[in-house]
Amino acid sequence: MTIVVGYVPKPEGRAALRRAAEEARLRGERLVVVSSLRAVRDTGADADNQYEQELLTVRDALEAAGIEHEVRQLVRGQEPSEDLIAIAEEVHADVIVIGLRRRSPVGKLILGSNAQRILLDAPCPVLAVKADEDDR
Amino acid sequence: MTIVVGYVPKPEGRAALRRAAEEARLRGERLVVVSSLRAVRDTGADADNQYEQELLTVRDALEAAGIEHEVRQLVRGQEPSEDLIAIAEEVHADVIVIGLRRRSPVGKLILGSNAQRILLDAPCPVLAVKADEDDR
């Protein structure tokens, strides 16, 4: 059994990863972390570098927790939702975990177009988690 | 730990209940089945009666599976999403399970306003499952 999680180095991505790791540990399932670079490309000049750093931290944490995992980075010009769904189909995911983002600065949650597509097009159930207030 | 599931006697409600029962069994958690009568009131003359029958079947199945459960029926004129969220808060739900419905006859999935509200306003993660094709 496999859990697929959509990861971006943002509060909603971290919240999703945390929950997905908990699920993987609880069920003894494999975790596939899918990060779409496209989702962070627009965030600034040092974003790529910082992103690589954060992915290394993620790998270390999963390694330390003894969770069987795999990290996939995709930069194919596809929407993040398409990446996630394609991989979920490929690995026969049991569940996809996604984070819902808050629209700063008001902090109101929104259902972005990526989240909506994943919820509707995923080949399996989707677990939607919220970014913690203190992740902001 | 408690799992809350939104139930209606429709394909999406049955799919949600099935998955929620699996989760409850896997995790040894308690299951709270929330059914908003309002959601079925419009479906026809015999709907209420048929609905009661189906709820009995649900109770029997959960009993037989050895899942600790509670069924709550609410007819307060509230939106089903408000019922679900209020109960999830009250029982400190670990997760809410909802079913996404298909717009017949084309069978395309839609994110209705209730699903969107639950996803955004729930005090905990939300697991969204799809009605099986053969549930239709």
Image: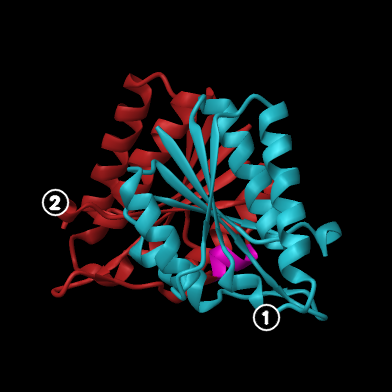
Chain colours: A red, B cyan
Which quarter of the image is occupied by the N terminus of chain B?
A: top left
Please indicate whether residue B5 sits to the left or right of residue A86 in the image: left
Position above or below: A45 against B54? below
Residue under disc 2 on the same chain as residue under disc 1: no
Q: What is the chief secondary structure element of the magenta stretch?
A: helix
Position above or below: A25 against B113? above
Query: Residue A63's x, y, as percent?
Result: 37, 23
Quadrant of the rendered structure where residue B110 is?
Answer: bottom right
> Magenta segment range?
A117-121
Reading the image, the residue beneath label 1 is B42
Q: CA distance from mark 2 to mark 1?
A: 43 Å
**Residue at 49%, 33% in the rendered image:** B30
- Label 1 resides on the chain identified as B
* Residue A118 falls inside the magenta stretch: yes
**Residue at 78%, 62% in the rendered image:** B50
Helix, strand or loop at label 2? It is helix
- Label 2 resides on the chain identified as A
Please indicate whether residue A58 sits to the left or right of residue B32 in the image: left
Reading the image, the residue beneath label 2 is A134
| Tag 1: amino acid | Asp
